[in-house]
Image: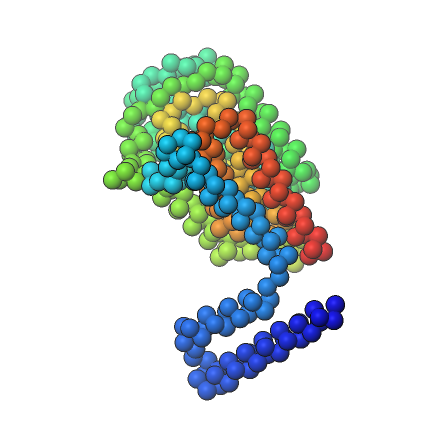
Amino acid sequence: MELEKDLQQVKDRKHAAFAYKYHLIDLLRMSKFTFAETNAQAWENYKYTFNRRTFLLQNGLYIAIVLIFIVLCIITPILKNTPLLTYNNVLNILQQASPRMFLALGVAGLILLTGTDLSIGRMVGMGMTTATIIMHQGVNTGFVFGHAFDFTSLPIGARVILALLVCVLLCTFFTAIAGFFTAKFKMHPFISTMANMLVIFGLITYATKGVSFGAIEPTIPAMIIPKINGFPTIILWAAAAIVIVWFIWNKTTFGKNLYAVGGNPEAASVSGISVFRVTVGAFVLAGILYGFGAWLECARMVGSGSAAYGQGWEMDAIAACVVGGVSFTGGIGKISGVVVGVFIFTALTYSLTILGIDTNLQFVFSGIIILVAVTLDCLKYVQKK
């Protein structure tokens, strides 16, 4: 203990000497530091405040995942005679992650409010079914409540826009209902969204008899998400969503209120913030993003919409947010973390699939990662307390 005390005093004196040196430089140059001096100060401050426990709590999971990917990149060429880290594989991962990014960005706002959403997968199925029916190649062979819809009289562009609008409206309608019950009656989102999940799945399955509606017009994907020199532009849709949601979270009054309500709803209410409006607004924003995500997935998969599509996607979206540092304790999270979480899970699933790992074992890997992520989050919360 005496040794640690003496070492800390030495560390403090060194830091004080460094700070005094730059204080004198500051006085001489009127706060005009060179690039090297600015970086030297940042590095010194980082070293001085560095704490091994805090560092491992914040970055331990990411370090472990990076090591796992390194191991996968080494063993995949040995076992499968094919490299894992190639340009095409990276593009495939980004392409698969793009529709899921919309879902994760939507539920991240609800987790920020200490909530969740169990109906994401069913909304994807509803959106896929709706979009496939509207953009179907020719007259629909499937029936909805006993009626076969025919949208072939509309121009292709009008059908694309109509499909997007209907997807967004349907998803927003159901999330707004869940948000209303959550905000008005203090119902936990677990219950309100679980009710949504059951209602949506029951309605879509009953209306369509659970059948798949085939393919959409083959020209539509090239209109929405064309490939330019092999580059899938669906990635640009996801990038636009990331920028927009980041702006909402960080540069608008609604975003600041979202953090405030998530951190302490009672204090936010006393400060004049409408907890009801913020909660419903977060659910509505989530519904808009779900609708866009389902519409893009329909274009990516060229249709094949059914009520069963998207099963389990809610777990992927929630897990991506948790791994990305969006805390269930509320009021803590960044868009960058959500993006990293989505890429981690998509890349892990893609890598394990190439390696030939059984799908059931992939669930085991995902479960372990989620458990470790939440454990680290709980430890960080306890430490702050």
Q: Quadrant of residue 183?
A: top right
- Front one among 366 and 226: 366
In this rendering, the answer to whether 81 lies above or below 343 is above
Give coordinates of residue 5: x percent, y percent: 71, 71
76, 310: nearer the viewer: 76
Name the residue: 62% across, 61% down. 51
Give coordinates of residue 172: x percent, y percent.
Answer: 51, 36
Residue 346 visible in the picture = no
Write down the quadrant of residue 368 in the picture: top right
Report which quarter residue 200 is drawn in: top right
Could you tell me which quadrant the N terminus lies in? bottom right
Residue at x-position 56% and y-position 44%? 323
Which residue appears at 53% of the width and 49% of the height? 63
Q: Is residue 232 above or below residue 147?
A: below
Q: Position of residue 54 (x, y in %)?
A: 62, 57
Q: Is residue 183 visible?
A: yes
